[in-house]
């Protein structure tokens, strides 16, 4: 029996109370299973990691390949863009070369002319290089819409002296060329008129006002502060109209002060207050009236309309000779030392650098009289000749009824050339006065100021009762024939009442004109009643023709009798 027990114990088939040792391996088995699952050194976990790393490597390879492809694409795009830019640059270079060639061709045939106008605006004109200056004159006058052309001209500055172009000569030989190849000229007044009523168009008068403003600004015309304030107020009134404290705040005169001073700071400190007080006094003045008053004051100023040139006298003193519509004036140290009217001058001429004036102020000139001689010396001969040309032009324009006709060229004149060939071309002042104006004046805008402009009146249909731009006496002169035609002569009192009513309508403010013109329609009884009472008037008109034909029939009978007797 003792030998069977160990067998039973070894086989473990019997259930004995001593089962404790068998419980421990089961717990170890249970514990070992999770250890095997979590153990990183187990064979199944290594295979999964290897698969993951292979996938990651494949993905990295794909990303790298995509990056390489993207880089190739970017390089290709950059290369295409670079080639496209090179093509565009080549095309632009070709276009530029073509344009340069065209410009060179044009520059040989055409020239760009920059003209500075009197309102400081600049316009560019294109003309042929070989054309005469008259072609350029026509271009400028057409752009400005000027018909009274002979008062103006084009010029350039040479040592602060104006050099006017001759319209009959080639423009290329007269105009200096800048480095950029552009011809730069100025437009301005050449003949300053003493009487502003000569002008037939408002635009001509307006250009004269701009010229005087510029001459005062550059100190070519001497003016006192009071006179300058008066001129400034007239320009102000012409541009903005009557003074209105709401529409004209403080500083509204700055734009107009710049017309006479280099800047607002250059003007006296009390200029704005004085101008404002003077502006309050100017009422009901139209631009045309302001400009006429402006020129009336300007013509009395010192050095108005004088073209000045610097020279030397016999004592080597520097003097200034001025040429104007009055004659010749010589200044020394801003003082007038000689003055010669055109009637006192016998002859002017030049010889090389010397300019000569023969004068005799005596009224009675015998046959063998010898005039006095005054000589002035210039830096070069061209300046002396230029002064002589200006004298000839000013004298012919103001003193001659018509320019001297040019003589026909002689067959043998080439071998006997002496003196200058200059002859004045254009119309004289007398011819301009006798010329007929245009049927309608051009519309233009006064550009004294860009911020402030005069409000235009409402356009009302012109009739026998209302006009806008003419004085009352002219309006009454036009109304009176209409009243005499429409009303009978027995109704003079009613006609006088209508005249006073129409004059009052003309003198009222333009804002109320439209309302007031409608009011007479509501009260037609005062005018229509006399028309109803005019019934007996046609009766004598019907009776008058009966005796009229009788003398007409009797008159032709005696008429042939004296003719036959004669």
Image (spheres, rainbow, N blue to C red):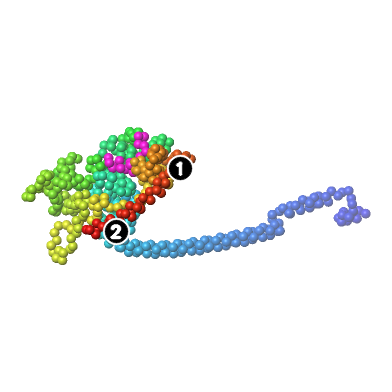
Q: Is residue 123 left or right of residue 61?
A: left
| Residue nearest the viewer, comparing 520 with 457 | 520
Question: Which residue is found at the position 32% from the left and 46% from the top?
Answer: 206
- Indicate the position of residue 349 as horizontal and vertical percent values: 14, 52
Q: Is residue 491 left or right of residue 293?
A: right
Question: Which residue is found at the position 74% from the left and 52% from the top?
Answer: 35
Residue interval drawn in magenta: 279-297
- Indicate the position of residue 25 as horizontal and vertical percent values: 80, 51
* Secondary-structure class at tag 1: helix
Pointer 1: what residue?
A: 532
- Indicate the position of residue 366 as horizontal and vertical percent values: 8, 48
Residue 52: quadrant of the picture: bottom right
Total marks placed: 2
Secondary structure, magenta segment, majority class: helix
CA–CA distance in space, label 1 to label 2: 66 Å
Pointer 2: what residue?
A: 135
Residue 211 can be seen, yes or no: no
- Indicate the position of residue 138 as horizontal and vertical percent values: 30, 56
| Residue nearest the viewer, comparing 411 with 67 | 411
> In terms of sequence position, does the residue under pointer 1 or pointer 2 come before the other?
2
Dot 2 surroundings within 10 Å: few (below 14), some, or many (20 or more)? some
Dot 1 surroundings within 10 Å: few (below 14), some, or many (20 or more)? few
- Name, please, the residue furthest toward the bottom: 411
């Amino acid at each position: 029996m003792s030998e069977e027990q160990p067998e039973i114990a070894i086989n473990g088939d019997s259930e004995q109370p001593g089962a404790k040792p068998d419980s421990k391996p089961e717990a170890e088995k249970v514990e070992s299973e999770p250890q095997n699952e979590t153990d990183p050194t187990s064979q199944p976990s290594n295979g999964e990691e290897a698969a993951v790393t292979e996938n990651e490597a494949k993905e990295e390879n794909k990303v790298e390949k995509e990056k390489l492809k993207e880089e190739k694409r970017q390089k290709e795009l950059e290369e295409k863009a670079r080639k496209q830019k090179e093509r565009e640059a080549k095309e632009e270079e070709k276009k530029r070369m073509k344009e340069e060639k065209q410009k060179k061709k044009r520059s040989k045939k055409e020239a760009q002319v920059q003209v500075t106008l009197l309102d400081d605006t600049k316009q560019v004109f294109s003309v042929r290089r070989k054309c005469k200056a008259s072609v350029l004159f026509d271009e400028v006058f057409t752009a400005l819409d000027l018909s009274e052309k002979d008062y103006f001209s084009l010029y350039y500055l040479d040592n602060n002296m104006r050099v006017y172009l001759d319209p009959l000569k080639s423009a290329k030989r007269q105009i200096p060329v800048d480095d950029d190849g552009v011809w730069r000229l100025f437009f301005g007044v050449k003949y300053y008129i003493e009487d502003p009523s000569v002008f037939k168009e408002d635009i001509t008068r307006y250009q004269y006002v701009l010229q005087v403003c510029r001459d005062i600004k550059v100190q070519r015309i001497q003016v006192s502060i009071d006179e300058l304030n008066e001129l400034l107020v007239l320009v102000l009134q012409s541009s903005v109209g009557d003074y209105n404290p709401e529409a004209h705040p403080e500083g509204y005169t700055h734009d107009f002060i710049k017309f006479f001073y280099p800047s607002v700071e250059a003007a006296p400190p009390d200029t704005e207050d004085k101008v404002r007080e003077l502006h309050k006094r100017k009422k009901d003045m139209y631009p045309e009236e302001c400009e006429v008053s402006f020129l009336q004051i300007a013509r009395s100023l010192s050095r108005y309309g004088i073209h000045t040139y610097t020279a030397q006298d016999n004592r080597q003193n520097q003097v200034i000779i001025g040429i104007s519509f009055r004659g010749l004036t010589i200044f020394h140290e801003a003082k007038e030392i000689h003055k010669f009217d055109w009637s006192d001058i016998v002859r002017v001429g030049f010889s090389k650098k010397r300019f000569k004036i023969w004068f005799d102020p005596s009224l009675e000139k015998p046959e063998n009289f010898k005039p006095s001689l005054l000589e002035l010396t210039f830096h070069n001969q061209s300046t002396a000749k230029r002064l002589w040309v200006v004298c000839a032009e000013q004298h012919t324009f103001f003193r001659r009824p018509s320019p001297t006709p040019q003589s026909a060229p002689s067959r043998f004149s080439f071998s006997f050339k002496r003196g200058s060939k200059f002859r004045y071309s254009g119309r004289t002042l007398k011819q301009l006065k006798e010329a007929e104006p245009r049927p309608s004046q051009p519309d233009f805008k006064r550009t004294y100021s860009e911020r402030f402009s005069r409000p235009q009146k409402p356009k009302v249909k012109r009739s026998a009762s209302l006009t806008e731009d003419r004085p009352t006496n002219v309006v009454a002169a036009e109304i009176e024939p209409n009243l005499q035609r429409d009303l009978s002569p027995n109704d003079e009192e009613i006609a006088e009442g209508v005249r006073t009513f129409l004059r009052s309508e003309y003198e009222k403010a333009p804002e109320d004109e439209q309302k007031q013109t409608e009011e007479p329609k509501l009260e037609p009884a005062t005018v229509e009643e006399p028309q109803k009472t005019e019934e007996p008037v046609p009766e004598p008109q019907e009776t008058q023709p009966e005796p009229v034909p009788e003398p007409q029939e009797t008159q032709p009978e005696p008429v042939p009798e004296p003719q036959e007797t004669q």
